[in-house]
């Protein structure tokens, strides 16, 4: 298993819960697993590192910039929100938060609650790490009638965890 790739158990959960070709996925972060998913689902990815951009996947290039939420969590920044304007109003069946890399930080997603609202379900990868676990909890606190599922698997680096959040509505007051 590739340490940068969504785990096998999380990928299996997606396969078990979403119909191929009829599912619209937004994935934050692009890599080998993204390319594999794009062969089975309608997929759009947001990526900051030009080295990971490929013509095999529809993408939005969004460089990392300073982000006030990221700063609160001592993270380097998050995707340039102005690059994400084209996503407003689009509905996604699944939002996968697997980027930016943990060394940059992922909490910047909290600065765009409208993006969460446009998704039926969120999968936060790498929640075996404290920052990603805290992010999943913060997202969960924004939701109403949330169902939380944790997906565990062993890897050559130890126990891995991804967290899935599904809800009926988002708390507009958040």
Image (cartoon, rainbow, N blue to C red):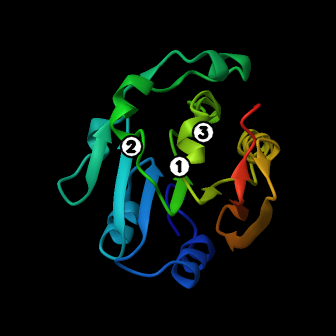
The dot on residue 9 is: none
Q: Residue at x 58, y 68 (%)?
A: 7
Q: Is residue 81 visible?
A: yes
Q: Residue at x 38, y 41 (%)?
A: 87
Q: Nearer the viewer, mark 1 or mark 2?
A: 1
Left or right: 97 in relation to 160: left
Mark 1 vs mark 3: which is more N-terminal?
A: 3
Q: Position of residue 108 (x, y in %)?
A: 59, 29
The dot on residue 118 is: 1
Residue under circle 3?
A: 102
Q: Residue at x 58, y 80 (%)?
A: 17
Alpha carbon of mark 2 to alpha carbon of mark 3: how far? 15 Å
164 lies above or below 143: below
Who is closer to the viewer here, 160 or 27? 27
Dividing the picture into quadrants, the one containing residue 134 is top right
Determine contact: label 1, label 2, CB under 8 Å: no
- Mark 2, residues whose alpha carbon is within 10 Å: few (<14), some, or many (≥20)? many
Determine contact: label 1, label 3, CB under 8 Å: no
The dot on residue 46 is: 2
Q: Position of residue 159 (x, y in %)?
A: 75, 65
Left or right: 131 in relation to 58: right
Q: Quadrant of the C terminus?
A: top right
């Amino acid at each position: 298993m590739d340490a940068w790739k969504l785990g096998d158990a999380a990928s299996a959960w997606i396969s078990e819960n979403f119909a191929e070709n009829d599912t619209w996925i937004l994935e934050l972060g692009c890599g080998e697993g993204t390319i594999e998913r794009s062969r089975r689902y309608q997929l759009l990815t947001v990526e900051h590192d030009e080295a990971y951009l490929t013509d095999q996947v529809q993408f939005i290039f969004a460089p990392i910039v300073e982000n006030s939420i990221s700063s609160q969590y001592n993270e380097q920044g998050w995707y340039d929100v102005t690059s994400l304007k084209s996503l407003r109003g689009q509905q996604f069946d699944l939002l996968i938060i697997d980027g930016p890399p943990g060394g940059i930080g992922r909490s910047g997603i909290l600065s765009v609650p409208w993006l969460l609202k446009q998704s039926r379900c969120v999968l936060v990868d790498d929640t075996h790490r404290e920052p990603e676990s805290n992010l999943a909890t913060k997202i969960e606190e924004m939701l109403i009638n949330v169902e939380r599922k944790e997906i565990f698997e062993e890897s050559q680096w130890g126990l891995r965890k991804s967290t899935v959040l599904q809800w009926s509505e988002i708390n507009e007051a958040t």
